[in-house]
Image (cartoon, helix red, strand yellow):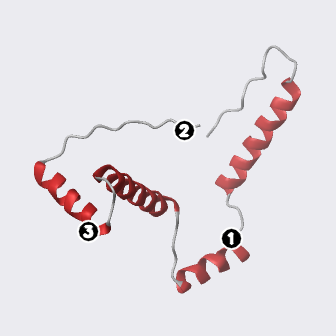
């Protein structure tokens, strides 16, 4: 059984098409479409990796690792946020099965 394919129609400047056709022939692609699909796959993968992967040199990684191993104590803002989260979580537990949720505490 053949898988379904999606169609992508492009309008290209003739110079870009000529450039792509030439490159396609040089790498031995059977068709221009095959070359374009491979180029899109490579560029898309690179773009996603650059957006999602953080690379650190050894000095930056050592600093990151040290910060993870010896974190600073929580400041008042973080402590208040954790307290509000615990309260909301407890409210959800208390309100299960109840029709009216309890009012939420004011958020600073």
Question: Is residue 37 or residue 86 the one in the foreground?
Answer: 37
State the image coordinates of residue 27 (x, y, percent, origin top left): 31, 68
The residue wearing badge 3 is: 26
Left or right? Give the position of 63 relative to 14: right
Q: Residue, x 81% and y 13% (percent of image)?
A: 99
Estimate the spatial distance between the alpha carbons at disc 3 and disc 1, rounded to whole Å: 57 Å
- 33 versus 49 height, above or below: above
**What residue is drawn where x is 48% and y is 62%?**
49
Q: Which quarter of the figure is the C terminus placed in?
A: top right
According to the picture, the residue beneath numbered tag 1 turns out to be 72
Q: Name which of mark 2 and mark 3 comes first in the sequence.
A: 2
The image quadrant that residue 58 belongs to is bottom right
Front residue of this view, candidates 75 and 91: 91
Question: Residue at left 29%, top 37%?
Answer: 9
Contact check, label 2 and label 3, Cβ < 8 Å: no
Tally the numbered discs.
3
Return the x and y of residue 90 as percentages of the image width and height: 84, 35
Residue receiving disc 2: 2
Q: Residue at x 46, y 58 (%)?
A: 45
Q: Residues within 10 Å of mark 2 (few under 14, many from 20)?
A: few
**View extreme (top): residue:** 99
Question: Is label 3 or label 1 in front?
Answer: 3
Apparent side of residue 3 relative to residue 89 in the rendered image (left or right):
left
Kindly identify which numbered label has been placed on residue 6: none
């Amino acid at each position: 059984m053949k898988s379904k394919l999606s169609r992508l129609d492009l309008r290209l400047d003739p110079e870009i098409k000529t450039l792509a056709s030439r490159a396609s022939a040089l790498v031995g692609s059977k068709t221009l479409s095959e070359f374009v699909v491979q180029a899109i796959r490579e560029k898309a993968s690179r773009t996603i990796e650059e957006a999602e992967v953080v690379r650190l040199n050894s000095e930056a990684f050592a600093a990151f690792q040290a910060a993870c191993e010896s974190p600073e104590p929580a400041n008042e803002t973080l402590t208040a946020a954790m307290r509000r989260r615990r309260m909301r979580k407890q409210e959800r537990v208390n309100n299960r099965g109840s029709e009216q949720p309890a009012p939420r505490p004011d958020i600073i």
